[in-house]
Image (cartoon, rainbow, N blue to C red):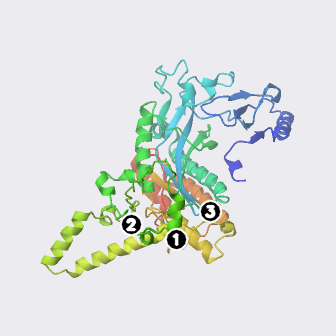
Amino acid sequence: MYISLFSPPCFHLPLEYAKLVSECTRLRRDDEANVVWIHKPVAQSQGRGIFLFRSVCDMSCGTSAVVQRYIERPLLIAGYKFDLRLYVCVPGYRPLTAYMYAEGLARFGTDKYTLSDIHNRYRHLTNSSLNKSGPRYAECKDRIGSGCKWTLTQVRKALVGRWGAAEWVMWQRVRALVTLTLLAQATGTPPARNCFEFYGFDVLLDDSLKPWLLEVNLSPALASDCEADIVVKQPMLHELFDLLGLPMKHTGLAKLKAPPLPINNSCSSDEESGTTRSTRARNAPRRGQRLRRRRALPMNCITLQGPGTQPITQLIQTETEKTNETSEKTKEPQSGRHKSNDSGDNADLQSTSSVSLQSSECVDESWRGGYATAATRRRLMTACHWGNGVKWNKAIGRVGHWVRIYPHSLPSGDDLPVEEVRDSVAQVTKLVRAAREVSREYGRDTSAPRDASRDAVFEAALRKKLIEFGPHFQVWLPPF
């Protein structure tokens, strides 16, 4: 219901073919017979199989497809159509925790936009994989330059001079669009542990600066075809590893090594080896068959710490450090400070081990009924606490350019947040309304600077209006 407010009318073929025909008949009756539709086949990528049409009679469909009403008046830069590629990371849906990267890509068509020719794909489609093969890709185009990609920073500099404070409000509406899309998906997603989703949102701006959701990509392209890809994607991936607490954030393999566990491979008797004589006789090699001995591989078990937690070097000590500590303890008496540190390390190790033990519990379907039972709350809390120490019910506000867009505020205690879709939608609506009020109050001065200093003033005013969100509320905005 909420997605229809920021997504064009869409029909799934062949199931909703009758609805599409009925809609086209209604538009023809209302003197809107020249409406343009876009046809996108299912399970395709890179712009393959996409075409535009005006009448259902001109549509040839042999496979499953999605037909969407075409945005006929998009926002243009130097006469070229473009859309935005935004990167979103969802570490968990129960409770919903979402981050959006502040930097992104703008993908341009390589021919100037016009509705007089709806069959020229280089005018209407912004897929970079398609426009790379266009005749004007390498040409230095007016204001766009060569290629077909910009960063969001370049888009902001191009729009702020024309739109002023309305450009700042537009980015807050883009944030609301992404949040509402995820909220529509979160209600039917079960809790999961140590799993995350990485999306590519395609958003189109019309000539009134209203954002429209085109599609959500489950596996966005991460190849580097031009300079804009390198500027955006490389730091985005590195900071994504930091956000999730993956080992790529650490420098040096020595910090990731732990002392190997002692493994005793020699058994003097059947009782010590844990096998009976009948079992050994049954597993004995047949006559003429060569006996193969398996080597016991050493296992190094470590617990990686996520952002905002205790460094891993304080939890993992090598054998040499332990021997040095024991030698120092024999020379001088142990102080109370050393005792407290040791007890704290042991407590941290016990807490991480308890989390790893809880991860073996299977998650049932009782989450659909809310947090009614203690077992359900325990399983959901286990899904919030990853094995690397990250607690997503207490998600960090930002890591690099990754900004938390949901939840807007964090719970005061360790309890699970109460997830009500109505309340969440009301918060998103309140955010957009407050952003409009800020732009009207502080954006009237045309002589004010239009740079990062203006963003700081707008952010302070927005936080003041949304004081009920608390100090953990984060403002998402592409950089200047």
Q: What element carries label 2?
A: loop
- Point out residue 303 in the picture as x, y percentages from the top left corner: 40, 62
- Residue 421's image quarter? bottom right
Residue type at the position of mark 2: Cys
Q: Which residue position is annotated with label 3?
A: 424
Residue type at the position of mark 3: Ser
- Point out residue 185 in the picture as x, y percentages from the top left corner: 65, 55
Residue at the outermost top position: 135
Marks 1 and 2, the one that precedes in the sequence = 2
The reply to whether discs 3 and 1 touch (Cβ–Cβ < 8 Å) is: no
- Which one is nearer the viewer's eye here, 321 or 306? 321
Q: What element carries label 3?
A: helix
Q: Which residue position is annotated with label 1?
A: 411
Q: What element carries label 1?
A: loop
Which numbered marker is on residue 267?
A: 2
Residue type at the position of mark 1: Pro
